[in-house]
Image (cartoon, rainbow, N blue to C red):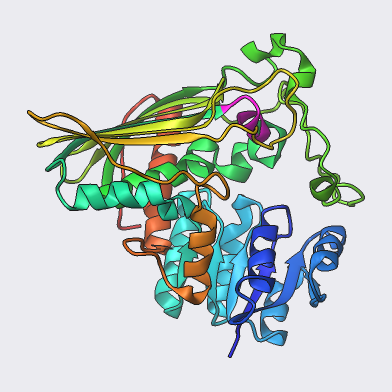
Amino acid sequence: MHTRYAIVGTGSRAEMFTRALTGPHRDTCALVALADPEPHRLAVHNARLPAPVPTYPATEFRRMLHEEKVDVAIVTTVDRVHDEYIVAALEAGCDVLTEKPMTVDAQRCARILDAVRRTGRRVRVTFNYRYNPFHETFKRLIAEGEIGEVGSVHFEWLLDVRHGADYFRRWHRAKANSGGLLVHKSGHHFDLVNWWLDDDPVSVYAQGRLFFYGSEGTGATAPKERFALGEDPHRDVLYTGTGDGYRRDQDVFAPGITIEDDLAVLVRYARGATMTYHLTAYAPWEGYRVMVNGSKGRLELEVVETDHVAPGATGLIKGDEPGRATLRVHPHWSEPREIPIPYEREGHGGGDARMLADLLGAGPPSGVAAAEAADGARALRIGLAANESIASGLPVRIRHDA
């Protein structure tokens, strides 16, 4: 018997789910409907399916769930309206898969958690980085006590000037839509650390600013063509010919951007560990470094996804460079050793395919647990507290009872 899925929000991210449901997982899953405010995007997605499915205006989401007998709703809309569809689906008796972040503010988060409690239904958040083999190995080493009790974490994430710029072209550039990068992007990273440490964040202090992009951005001296999105007919057809007036490729140096591109965060956890975190959205190369210090030694992970952006590069396609990852254990009073880990370039280090296999019914890889609503809230609270700290200049305590 097939589990019946419907998707609300048919931008480019929805295609990961339509392909999975009608491809590798078609023997156990059925895509039965699509919903979106824009008829054009519905038509584009439907034309790409092996067989068309019923489509509904987003305003008729509840009717779609009832008429199509939906078991699981997949939410891939603009972040600020996630809660509307999550709560409606839960109240209709459906489970939910939602794109990260789960939502963008504390009130919407509380509304979702209340609906989960009231209905007894399940919300899972698509934190695909949990399923990357690097991160699974990192989790196992910490859990097995390889470096003893964790004292501190340093996490640096670099978005290159090709990928980073994309958050400043799209609807994400308005904090009301996305919560800013500390909610929309860094939520992935905060979830990883929460999961690795198996602990609750309790206080946050942060600083951030719009430094490189925006009307006063220091990057505006570079040639404008270096920040062009480039043509991609498969992607672009979703955003041309629509009636909503949305522009996918906005000027990253125009006025009106309300999110930051350079962010520093300090987090304390309930058992005493601290995390220092930095996100740079205008770096010359893309990747990340994580260092965990413990009572018996240190873990170091470095991942280089692209080592540079060529002057003529446009769009979001990463270059031909193979990428690399290095994981080392540095025990006290002993030589360091490298832990062999495979590098998969596609789909967030192989995380997308592994996540979809878990969420769509094949079961989780060993050592990985899907992120539930409580996990989505725990990651979100760090980003929200960091935003509050940036605005006030003060540290912020995190409440976990809301």
Residue at horizontal 19%, vertical 46%? 270
Is there any visible trace of residue 304 in the rendered image? yes
271 left or right, relative to 340: left
Q: In which quarter of the image is residue 251?
A: top right
Is there any visible trace of residue 199 in the rendered image? no
| Quadrant of the snapshot with the N terminus | bottom right
366 left or right, relative to 248: left
**Is 161 in the magenta?**
yes
Q: Where is residue 60 in the image (x, y as percent from the top left)?
A: 75, 73
Residue closer to the observer: 8 or 17: 17
Residue at horizontal 82%, vertical 50%? 234
**Is 72 in the magenta?**
no
Stretch of the chain drawn in magenta: 160-167
- Residue farthest along the bottom direction in this orientation: 1
Q: Where is residue 124 in the image (x, y as percent from the top left)?
A: 47, 65
Residue closer to the observer: 163 or 26: 26
Q: In which quarter of the image is residue 159?
A: top right
| Quadrant of the snapshot with the C terminus | bottom left
- Residue farthest along the left direction in this orientation: 333
Q: Quadrant of residue 206?
A: top left
Note whether 265 is above or below 138 in the view shown.
above
Residue at horizontal 81%, vertical 40%? 247
Q: Position of residue 7 (x, y in %)?
A: 67, 68
